[in-house]
Structure formats: structure tokens, C-alpha cells
Amino acid sequence: MTDADGGTRQASVAQLAARHEQAGGVAVTDVDSGTRQASVAQLVSTAVEQMSRLFRDELRLAQAELAQKGKKAGIGAGLFGGAGLFALYGLGCLVAAAVLGLATVMDGWLAALAVGGALFAVAGIAALAGRREVGQATPPVPEQAIDGVRADARTVREGIHR
């Protein structure tokens, strides 16, 4: 190899190191030649560090997503419980209406029947709202985090194949 070839090689190595540094990589100065280049060990170390950081970030995203879905499920379960309570009150009112209907001929039981029907309507509305909340919380899988990991893996595979 002549000086001219060596000079060309050094210039191309310096260009590659500069491009690598611009892409966020680590560059090291070689004391003997004065050119900037990264060793394979440093590149692997940087890649492992970046993958570790990426993995931790994806785990934090998964935790946040599961917490949000858990909150939705809790609200839905509470609304279902409320619907059950109102249905129990409605049943109590219907029983009271039957008793009052037998005791008197008109007014008392008709009022109790109207109140019982209104309580059942409230229970129905709460049950529908609870079903909607629970439906938004399922499946309890951190979908955004999984999509992010898949995209990261795709990017790494594409980078390896280049």
C-alpha cells in the first residue's frame, strides 16, 4: 500500500467516523494515525447501552398503559356495582309496591311502582356505562408498548441487513 492509498484510506475512515458521530455513535481518536474511528467493542457497548435504555423506556410505557387500563376497569366495575345496588333498590320498591297494592286499592302502590321503574332505569343506564368502561380496558395488554418494541426490532433488523 502506498502513501497515496494510505492517505485515501485515512480520509475515507475519517469520513465514516464523522458520519457515525453525526448519527449519534461514539468516535475515538486513534493516537497512531490521528484518524477518528470507533472500535467494534465500543460500538457493541454503545448498542447494548442504547438497547438497554430503549427496553427500560418500553417497560415504563407498558406500566403506564396498564395503569390506565386498570383504572378504566376499576371505574367500570364500580359502575356495575352501582347498577346492582340500584337494581336491589328497585326490587325493594317493587316489593313495597306489591304490598301497598294489596293494602290499598290505588294510590300508594302506583307511586311505588313509578319509583321502582325509575330506579331500574337508572340501573340500566349505569350498567351500560359500566360495560362501555370495561370494554375500553380490555384486553389488558400494553398495546402501545408492544407496537413500540416491534417497531424497534424492525429498525434493528433493517440496520443489520444494510
Image (cartoon, grey):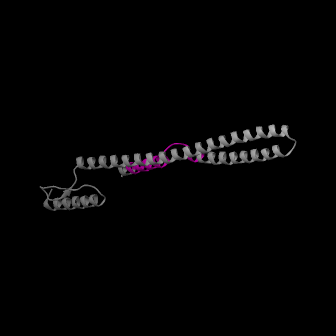
Start-end of magenta stretch: 135-157
Task: Left or right? Give the position of 97 relative to 140.
Answer: right
**Quadrant assignment for the N terminus:** bottom left
Indicate the position of residue 62 as horizontal and vertical percent values.
44, 46
Task: Left or right? Give the position of 100 relative to 29.
Answer: right
**Which residue sits furthest front?**
104
> Magenta stretch mostly in which secondary structure?
helix
Indicate the position of residue 114 as horizontal and vertical percent values.
78, 47
Asked if residue 51 is among those painted magenta in the image, a careful observer would answer no
Asked if residue 147 is among those painted magenta in the image, a careful observer would answer yes
Q: Is residue 32 placed above or below 99 in the rendered structure?
A: below
Q: Is residue 75 placed above or below 36 in the rendered structure?
A: above
Tell me the residue at 21%/60% (across/down).
Answer: 14
Tell me the residue at 23%/49% (across/down).
Answer: 42
Task: Please tell me which residue lies in front, 130 or 138.
Answer: 130
Q: Is residue 89 placed above or below 32 in the rendered structure?
A: above
Indicate the position of residue 49 as horizontal and vertical percent values.
30, 48
Task: Please tell me which residue lies in front, 140 or 101.
Answer: 101
Task: Please tell me which residue lies in front, 64 or 37.
Answer: 64
Tell me the quarter of the picture where residue 34 sits: bottom left
**Which residue sits furthest right?**
105
Tell me the residue at 46%/46% (across/down).
Answer: 146
